Amino acid sequence: MSEAPLSPPAGVNPVRVEKLEALRARGVDPFAVRAFPVSHHARAIHEGFAELEGRTVAVAGRVKAIRRHGRAAFVDVWDESGRIQVHLREDALGAEAFGLLDLLDLGDIVGVEGTVFRTRRGEVTVDAARWEMLAKSLKALPDKRHGLKDIDLRYRWRYLDLLANPEVRDTFLVRSRTLSLIRRYLDARGFLEVETPVLLTVAGGAEARPFTTHHHALDLPLYLRIALELALKRLIVGGFERVYEIGRVFRNEGISTRHNPEFTMLELYQAYTDFRGMMALLEGLLPYLVQKIRGGPALTYQGRQLDFRPPFRRVDLAEAFRDATGTPWEDVRTREAAAALAARHGVRVDPAADRVQILDKVIGALIEPELIQPTFLWHHPVDLSPLAKRDPEQPHLTERFELFVAGRELANAFSELNDPLEQRRRFLDQLARREAGNEEAHMLDEDFLNALEHGMPPTGGLGIGIDRLVMILTDSPSIRDVILFPTMRPIPPESGEA
């Protein structure tokens, strides 16, 4: 029994569906094509014209323009490298193949085989000897004049954004190249890339609310990882001396121009060094990336010139806090005192926030926005840094820094705490904060403590937010601009959008 034809879904152009059926009636089903061997991309034909003139090539891509001239036509075909013009003639193709052009629409995907020549106007062109419809576009692409400008739709329909806005493609090419360069830099310095679990029984390594899930076969609650840290430090215990991972992490928090619940981190750990070793590594890695991506030691981000030539500026957090608030950190001993301090400086805080969260919010409001040039904000108080070693000269502070660029955190690093007894004490302090209602405080990870109890060498650790780094390198104002498919609220079915 034959299947009844489906009515076109909402938003599908009925005229294009009719053309698809007309193609099939002529024995041409574009969705039945299995492959089309491509010999050259558009850019290669333009750049290699001197060698390719008169030779046969095969190209494929999406139709962006059709210009009919009686028994001939010019079609602009776009592939991932750019545009190539195709010349189609009835006398070369035959009346039947040429007549199929009547069923061609903008957005359709075609394959063309022909010889390379230059038109009288100087346009490098493929003179078609054969062409195939490889896929039919049943919806119109964003028009050339207006493009796809609605920012919400651009993030939601990234596939159309990439087609309509070439600069978006460039951003993601830079992202890919950045990751390749990071790997090249670290691999050349003896670091080993590893992969660690995404699903965990204990979410640790950062202060964040995790996403939860459930393993049905084991009847086991699990968390999506909020950091890469604790698994990588287990590998240092296991004898690896330089490891890194570039991976997705997940934090069940708000969405903003700087935050997406799913994002990419680079974390690396190196035995027998400390946070100063991590400073030196960053002062080598970031200038290397800026030079390779932007062609020099400086770049412009959102109208500000940023200079990545080392050494980066150092700012002591305790001094900066005192200068910004008029109060030493150690004098703010209770939640009430922290809340009063925030109120005096007009910093709004969550009523459920504890003392440490409030003080962190004050730092974010009063200190961080002033750190425009690459700046190490270092020597964080112990209660802000449960996984970092104490500074031996100032035991209330830690050997930790955060790197800020353009007023936002780009990296975080420690001399890693390797004393298992001290680590247990700090975990218990964090556990008390969780029991008091702070869902972002660290969980108690007994397996990690077990690893430390077997001995971990002195270690420096570093985390870099890849998305924020790419924002800087591409002059992108929002984290959504550098994530291919950022988290979005679904469109309600009744909206009719598609």
Image (cartoon, rainbow, N blue to C red):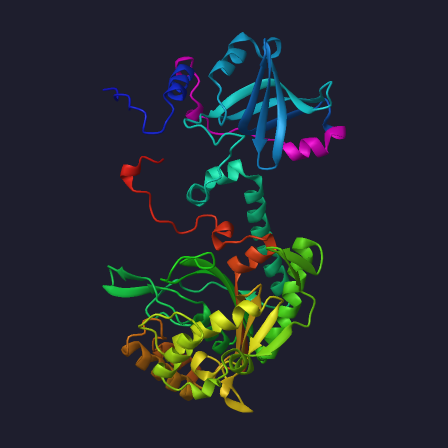
The mark tally for this picture is 0
Q: Is residue 38 magenta?
A: yes
Rendered location of residue 16, percent (x, y): 41, 21
Rendered location of residue 492, percent (x, y): 29, 42
The picture quadrant where one finds residue 303 is bottom right
The picture quadrant where one finds residue 212 is bottom left
Name the one closer to the observer, 313 or 115: 313
The picture quadrant where one finds residue 311 is bottom right
x 38%, y 60%: residue: 254
- Quarter of the picture containing the C terminus is top left
- Quarter of the picture containing the N terminus is top left
- Visible in this render: residue 467? yes
- Visible in this render: residue 232? no
Q: Is residue 7 left or right of residue 227?
A: left
Q: Is residue 161 magenta?
A: no
In this picture, is 393 found above or below 28? below
Q: Is residue 465 left or right of residue 429?
A: right
Residue found at the very far right of the displayed protein: 50
In this picture, is 111 found above or below 95? below
x 59%, y 9%: residue: 71
Rendered location of residue 438, percent (x, y): 32, 74
Rendered location of residue 219, percent (x, y): 23, 63
Magenta region: 24-51
x 39%, y 52%: residue: 487
